[in-house]
Amino acid sequence: MEFVQPIRDKKQVDAMKKILKSTNLRDYCLFVLGINSGLRVSDLLSLRVGDVVDERGKVNDRIDIREQKTGKTKDFPLGDTSKKALRDYLTSRFTKHVVRDEPLFRSKKGGAMQRSQAHKVINDAARAIGITDRIGTHTLRKTFAYHAYMSGTDITRLQKLLNHSSPSITLAYIGITQQELDNVYLSLEL
């Protein structure tokens, strides 16, 4: 597996959202849900419509799934950005009634979107806005973790959210650069 980077620049995240939203609401929703949930792509792609909407077709406030890799239950709230992306996508996809047992991210052939297809979507959008770092499906999870950490989330909380065994693994995972560590010294003028 190729080592990929998070998208560190918030302007690039916004540009990715803009380009994806203008081309395909499914791809936009995948990106938004990925960067706001920290789910692994295998868990994102295995979501069913019923995992995100209730019996009436209304978007849930929370997602409760069993992670494929760890087998652990993950239950987390959806923020407004994710809920709006899901509503927009599902409204465009279902004109009459929501089919809860279908894959959330469906391929053109009707089955669940494949990892390779998700990789292409994310990479193409990244290249279109000028990102040259290695980008892949895991970039979504890393972007979530990176921005959570940079906004002040405690590393041990982030470690727990990501199911990592130690804070040092989480720091390495999110790709904290030497420049970012140096900035701590340079910005702290006591």
Image: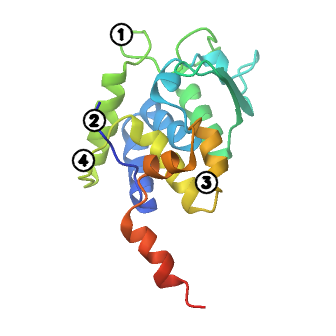
Tell me the SS state at disc 1.
loop
Say which of marks 2 and 3 sits in front. 3
Choose the circle earlier in sequence order: 2 or 3: 2
Residue topped by disc 3: 155
Q: Earlier in the sequence, mark 2 or mark 1?
A: 2
Task: Work out whether mark 4 precedes mark 3 in sequence or the reverse, and give the earlier one.
Answer: 4
Amino acid type indicated by mark 1: Lys
Residue at point 71% right, 20% down?
57
Residue at horizontal 25 percent and vertical 48 percent from the top = 128
Classed neighbour count for the residue bearing mark 2: other residues with Cα under 10 Å, few (<14), some (14–19), many (≥20):
few
**Residue drawn 70% across the image and 35% down it:** 76
- For discs 1 and 3, the disc positioned in front in the rendered view: 3
Pointer 2 with pointer 3, Cβ within 8 A? no
Q: Which mark is residue 127?
A: 4
Label 4, label 2: how far apart the Cα atoms are:
17 Å
Q: CA distance from mark 4 to mark 3?
A: 30 Å
Q: Residue furthest bottom?
A: 190
Image coords of residue 102 (percent x, y):
55, 10
Kindly report the distance in space between the C-alpha atoms of the residues bearing marks 1 and 3.
Answer: 41 Å
Give the mark, 1 or 3, whose residue is nearer the N terminus: 1
The answer to which of marks 1 and 4 sits earlier in the sequence is 1
Q: Which residue is mark 1?
A: 109
Q: What is the CA distance from the residue labelled 1 to the residue labelled 4?
A: 26 Å
Instruction: Give whichever of 40, 27 is nearer the camera.
Output: 40
